[in-house]
Amino acid sequence: MKNFVKYLNRHGVFVILPFFMYLIFRLMLVEECNEFERYGFGFFFFFFLIISNFYFVLYQTEKIHEHEDNSGGRFKFLAHTLGIIFFLSLTFASYYWCLFDYNKSSFLKVSEANEYLDFFYYSFGVFIMNNTSEIQPNSLYAKLFVGTEMLTAFITLILILANYKDLKAKKSLS
């Protein structure tokens, strides 16, 4: 249980970071910004999304190498992979919600009642490449963020498939 709490504390920062940055933007900058500053903040927002993606992908590769050395690592590897997918989906849902809250036309067909849950469902669908949601990105930033999630999902899938076979082979050799 102690390891689980430590795991949540380490990765939860990336889920909360978009809300914190968006709060700063709404409180300090939104009233007195011109278009250039708003676009600058959008790219700054996107930069933090890229940093969080790099963190999760590097963490996944670190766990791959850790489980290669461990004889019983296949199932722990899958558990870590599911945790990474869950946290990445939460992180992207946070960014999507912030974009939608700032500009309601960023995404189309979002229900008014459960916006964050809709974005989590949409993000998870994009991540597992089974997007059956009716939500559609409409703005430049929304399309950029969704494209980034698709690229991250593809990279993560490649890491999983390439190394799961190796972990399975090492397990059978032991």
Image (spheres, rainbow, N blue to C red):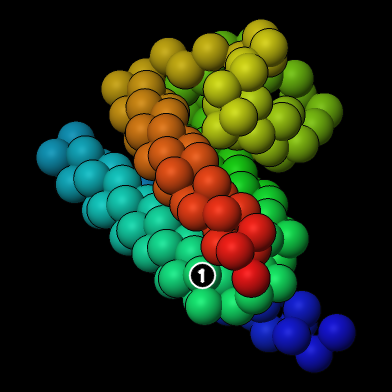
Element on which disc 1 rests: helix
Q: Amino acid at mark 1?
A: Glu
In the displayed image of the protein, which residue is found farthest to the left?
36
Write down the residue under mark 1.
68
The image shows residue 44 at horizontal and vertical percentages of: 25, 53
What residue is drawn where x is 44% and y is 44%? 162
Quick check: 109 above or below 174? Answer: above
Is residue 96 or residue 83 the one in the foreground? 83
Quarter of the rendering containing residue 128:
top right
Viewport quadrant of the N terminus: bottom right
Query: In the picture, which quadrant includes the C terminus?
Result: bottom right
For the residue pair 121 and 168, the one nearer the viewer reads as 168
Total tally of numbered discs in the picture: 1
Residue farthest front in this picture: 173
Along the viewing direction, whichever of 140 and 125 lies nearer the viewer: 125
Q: Dot 1: few (<14), some (14–19), or many (≥20) neighbours within 10 Å?
A: many
Position of residue 27 measured from the top left corner of the image (x, y, whole percent): 45, 60
Question: From this viewpoint, which residue is outermost toward the bottom?
Answer: 2
Is residue 23 visible from the viewing direction of this image?
no
Residue 64 lies, in percent from the top left, at: 49, 64
Residue at x 23% of width, y 45% of height:
43
Q: Residue 171 vs residue 143: left or right? A: right
Snapshot quadrant of residue 117: top right
With respect to residue 154, does 17 lie above or below? Answer: below
Q: Position of residue 65 (x, y in %)?
A: 45, 71
